[in-house]
Amino acid sequence: MMWLIGASILLVRGAGYLHDRSWHSWALGLGLALGAIKARVLLDRVARTAVMRVLARGKAGFLGFFSVRSWMLIAVMMGGGIALRRLVVHPGVVGAGIMGAIYIGVGTALLIADRIFWRAVIEPIPDAGNLVA
């Protein structure tokens, strides 16, 4: 659920940066493409690792499905997004297309990779081979 909520927030925020700007359509396309690539290259592996961690424990607490290192990386990424949004890019300026592409890309990546978590929830006992597709 956390990745689904995070993806939803990022996609809505990214769409807000691209709203009413037809010349930003390139940013939407770029964000979607980069998000799909990021999901397959990076986040699928992270999601599989998290699922295997939960399966090995038998159950997970709210914060227990990611390692401390992963949580620190999440905090750095969130802080970076907040800093960019407040210091550099505002919705009414030219850089909004870039920020929209970043948000759309990360949100898309989370949404695509989230399928691994949902598959693990739906299947009674998933094996590592079924978590790939």
Image (spheres, helix red, strand yellow):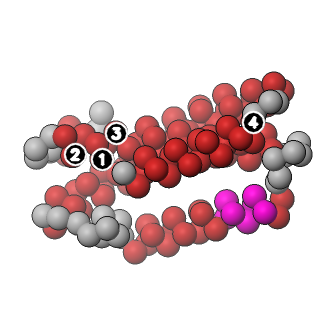
Quick one: SS at disc 3? Answer: helix
Quick one: label 3, few (<14), some, or many (20+) residues within 10 Å? some
Q: Quadrant of residue 81?
A: bottom right
Task: Note whether 69 is above or below 108 in the view shown.
Answer: below
Mark pair 3, 1: CA separation = 5 Å
Quick one: label 1, few (<14), some, or many (20+) residues within 10 Å? some
Residue 18: mark in rendering: 4
Residue 115: mark in rendering: 3
**Residue type marked 2:** Ala
Q: Which residue is pictured at 89% across the width and 45% down the height?
A: 93
Closest to the camera, between mark 4 and mark 3, is 4
Mark pair 1, 4: CA separation = 29 Å
Label 2 sits on residue: 120
**Residue type marked 4:** Leu
Quick one: SS at disc 4? Answer: helix
- Residue 17: image location, x then y, percent: 75, 42
Mark pair 4, 2: CA separation = 34 Å
Check whether the beta carbons of the residues at disc 3 and disc 1 lie within 8 A of each other. yes
Closest to the camera, between mark 1 and mark 4, is 4
Q: Earlier in the sequence, mark 4 or mark 2?
A: 4
**Residue type marked 1:** Phe
Q: Nearer the viewer, residue 11 or 44?
A: 11
Q: Which residue is pictured at 21% across the width and 46% down the height?
A: 121
Q: Which residues are magenta?
A: 80-86
Label 1 sits on residue: 117
- Residue 11: image location, x then y, percent: 59, 41
Q: Earlier in the sequence, mark 1 or mark 4?
A: 4
Q: Earlier in the sequence, mark 2 or mark 3?
A: 3
